[in-house]
Amino acid sequence: MIRTIYLILIFILILGCQDKVYYEKPEGLLEKEEMIEILYDMHLAVGTSNIQNVHFEKNRNYTSLVYEKYGIDSTRFLEANVYYTAHIQEYEEIFEEVERRITELKQVMEPQSDSTSVISNKIREAGRKQDSIRKVLKSKN
């Protein structure tokens, strides 16, 4: 009898310790492609929040603008995020695509930032040359 109770308790313990969590698909679940778009924009929003914008504001939270862009609220995003987290294979595919897009954007933007810094360095150098020419001309006069 005691042996049977121990077996039942061990069986319950094993079932209770499973690492798989099953969530039912919530109503109005964001589709996989839409989730990719939202997470991509979220990463950009978080990454740019520390950069000064045109209104000289820094450390601004842009995630609300992402929600507004896609016509969702934070609760709907959270429900979709929890669902996809429970379905790790799909979530991994989503994040791989987001990472690919960010890498692609980075490759496009880095040459521009390099050329911008080269141009600004040339402008500074030209300004220094003009300043030294002005000094020489002032000293001769």
Image (cartoon, rainbow, N blue to C red):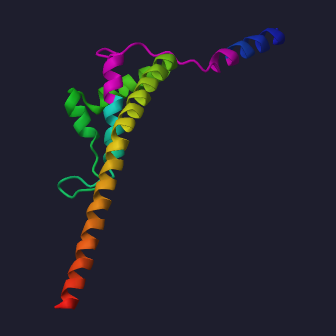
Residue 20 is one of the magenta-drawn residues: yes
Which residue shows up at 82% across the image and 12% down it?
A: 2
Which residue shows up at 36% across the image and 24% down it?
A: 36
Residue 110, image x, y percentages: 37, 43
- Using residue 60 as the reference point, say whether residue 7 is left or right of it: right
Residue 56, image x, y percentages: 21, 58
Residue 136, image x, y percentages: 24, 84
In the image, 72 versus 3, the foreground residue is: 72
In the image, 50 versus 103, the foreground residue is: 103
In the image, 117 versus 35, the foreground residue is: 117
- How many numbered callouts? 0
Residue 24 is one of the magenta-drawn residues: yes
Does residue 49 sit above or below 29 in this rendering?
below
In the image, 6 versus 25, the foreground residue is: 25
Quarter of the figure that contains the N terminus: top right
Which residue shows up at 53% across the image and 18% down it?
A: 21
Quarter of the figure that contains the C terminus: bottom left
- Using residue 80 as the reference point, say whether residue 3 is left or right of it: right
Name the outermost residue toward the front. Answer: 140
Residue 97, image x, y percentages: 42, 24
Which residue shows up at 46% across the image and 25% down it?
A: 96
Range of residues picked out in magenta: 13-38
